[in-house]
Amino acid sequence: MNADAAWKTTTKVAGFGWTLRDSIGTSVSSSHTGYERFVGSALAAEGLAMRAALTKCKEKGVKRVICESDSSQLIKAINSGSWKPEIYGIVADICELACFFDVINFFWIPRERNTIADSLAKQCLLEVEAFMAVT
């Protein structure tokens, strides 16, 4: 599973994107997006994207998952147990969700290997902001 977020400082809106693949890299479901308002930082947005993706994996009954993100701060926080106050609750939620899976690992990947999730997150953010502008 690859997850990413796009966040805008001025509106505090974050768009999320994630993809699910099988063990040989074939997409196993359509790509997913989501958004959240009142997000305080880019790091919080990354955490919210990971939490949303794991929630979807749980709903689909996935029991083994490798979670990949291009946010080194988020992956370090999850793997080390040393959580920054700004993402404490989000990482706690991620760790609670992790208990559902038989196997779960969290890895940092370079941004170049996360382009699909990145594109989905950016597109979702644009759509949400456009919707907010007309309402």
Image: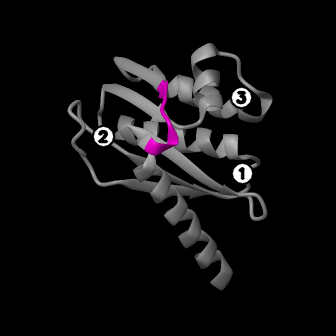
The residues tagged by marks 1 and 2 sit, at their Cα atoms, a distance apart of: 26 Å
The 10 Å Cα crowd at callout 3, few under 14, some 14 to 19, many 20 or more, is some
- Residue at image position (76%, 48%) is 40
Q: Amino acid at mark 3?
A: Tyr
Q: Amino acid at mark 1?
A: Val
Query: Which residue is under mark 2?
Result: 60
> x and y percent of residue 12 in the render?
74, 58
Extent of the magenta region: 107-112
Give the vertical position of 69 relative to 13 (above or below).
above
Q: How are the residues colored? A: one colour
* Residue 88 numbered mark, or none: 3
Specify whether residue 135 is in view: no
Q: Secondary structure at mark 1?
A: loop
Instruction: Give yes or no for contact between labels 3 and 1 (Cβ–Cβ under 8 Å).
Output: no
Query: Which residue is under mark 1?
Result: 39
In the orientation shown, which residue stands out farthest toward the top?
80
Give the vertical position of 29 relative to 22 (above or below).
below
